Image (spheres, rainbow, N blue to C red):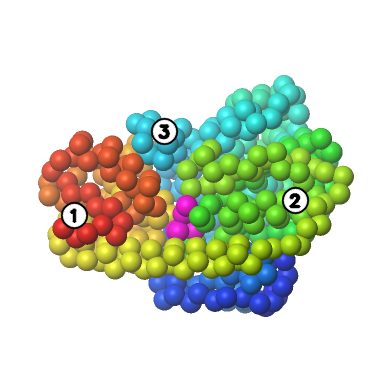
Amino acid sequence: MTSTNQCLLCHHEVFTEFPELSELKSVTSDCRPWSHGNTILVCSHCGLVQKPIDGQWQQEVAAIYSQYAPYSLSAGREQPVFPGGGSANYSQARSVVILKHLRESVTLPPQGTLLDVGCGNGAFLKAVSHSFPQWQLSGFEQNRLHEEEIMQINGVANFYASLTEINQIFDVIALIHVLEHILQPLSFLTNLREKLNPSGILLIQLPNLAENPFDLVVKDHSSHFTKRTLKWLVEATGFNTITVATDWVTKEISLVATPTAMPIQSTAFESLEVREASQLVKKNSEWLQNLVEHAHEMATTTDQFGIFGTAIAGSWLAGILEEKVKFFVEEDGQKLGKLYLGKPVLALAELPKESVVYIALPTKIAQAIYRRIQPLCPQVKFVLPNQSVNG
């Protein structure tokens, strides 16, 4: 169990506290509204944004993981992403996009071995299996809920539920939306490094706090990374960063690294960077609070109020507004015609006339979506976060 008074990254014990979001509900990473939020902490030494890890938090997260169901509304099929932050009128599975960019960053041979850490129900393993049919694949997940499904993927040879079970070395180790859940990321990555070929590739992708305020309200995310804190973590555990990008998938950081002979033992943190982390949390917290107030206000203007999207942001807002929400709007055909949180999921063409639809997404993404869909539904009022009520 991790001490509640130590930073999850550098283990120092002094924090700046931001209790504002503890007064709001939160959401799980598999998109279930949760009853309450958490105080947010910023380490005064390294600037890592994190949650206080106490007994109650750990019990709640254990309960979340015990019934974890990724992509439940789409019957387990991975969510699509829209290249360009929603400005393009087509989508691709996120794992396909990640793998495409990885292949552009490094040379992957026709044959090799890959371990997908936190493999969930196998979305990334399926993408690798399709593109690299001769690779030997393995999945790692802390519970065995999806073991049978994982083992049925072509090329998958092993399923592991603990690091101690792993008895082989891999050419690629992938952590897709995993590190933000890990309570001891330094030791975790250090142990994984021992399972990686000396010339192997480490792939990490996780939420980008600098572009995604909603990351703060995900209940089971213990850490909230920026490019700087992720790069520091990776290099401190014995890797050399090849690339760290924020344009592979919108709102997310993608990092590729390879092992080095010795970890980079830098412990120097700039006080300016720590202040910037605190300012980022303050700004994001205020933005989220304003969004809730604004959405409440907009919901009172109509009896046909909907939310665009059924992922983390939309689910979080729906959990707060509850009965004020009459429907959800989706462009993902896998979700249409179903009920989500007891409300119908509608296509753009099905929206009631003169309804109000709140685009609960980070501002730049919401603006791109608005520009694309408003001309398709002139009878609907689409509302951007924190937009003027009369705007």
Principal SS element in the magenta part? helix
Task: Look at label 2 and name its amino acid.
Answer: Glu
The dot on residue 91 is 3
Query: Which element is circle 3 on?
Result: loop
Query: Which element is circle 2 on?
Result: helix
Nearest to viewer (mark 3 / mark 1):
1
* Residue projecting furthest to the right: 261
Question: Does the image show residue 355?
Answer: yes
* Residue projecting furthest to the top: 110
First along the sequence among labels 1 and 2: 2
Task: Look at label 1 and name its amino acid.
Answer: Gly
Q: Which image quarter holds the N terminus? A: bottom right
Res 185 quadrant in image: bottom right
Rendered location of residue 149, percent (x, y): 60, 40
Gap between marks 3 and 1 measured at Cα: 29 Å
Q: Few, some or many C-alpha atoms within 10 Å of disc 1 (few <14, some 14-19, many ≥20)?
A: few
Task: Look at label 3 and name its amino acid.
Answer: Ser
Horizontal placement of 347 versus 272: left or right?
A: left
Q: Few, some or many C-alpha atoms within 10 Å of disc 2 (few <14, some 14-19, many ≥20)?
A: many
Rendered location of residue 213, percent (x, y): 45, 59
What residue is at 19 percent from the left and 44 percent from the top? 351
Gap between marks 1 and 2 measured at Cα: 46 Å
Residue nearer the viewer, 30 or 365: 365
Query: Which element is circle 1 on?
Result: loop
Gap between marks 3 and 2 measured at Cα: 33 Å
Residue ID for mark 1: 391
**Residue 6 sits above or below residue 259 on the image:** below
Residue ID for mark 2: 235
Give the residues drawn in magenta, as a range.
211-215
Residue nearer the viewer, 44 or 384: 44
What residue is at 63 percent from the left and 33 percent from the top? 102
Rendered location of residue 318, percent (x, y): 33, 60
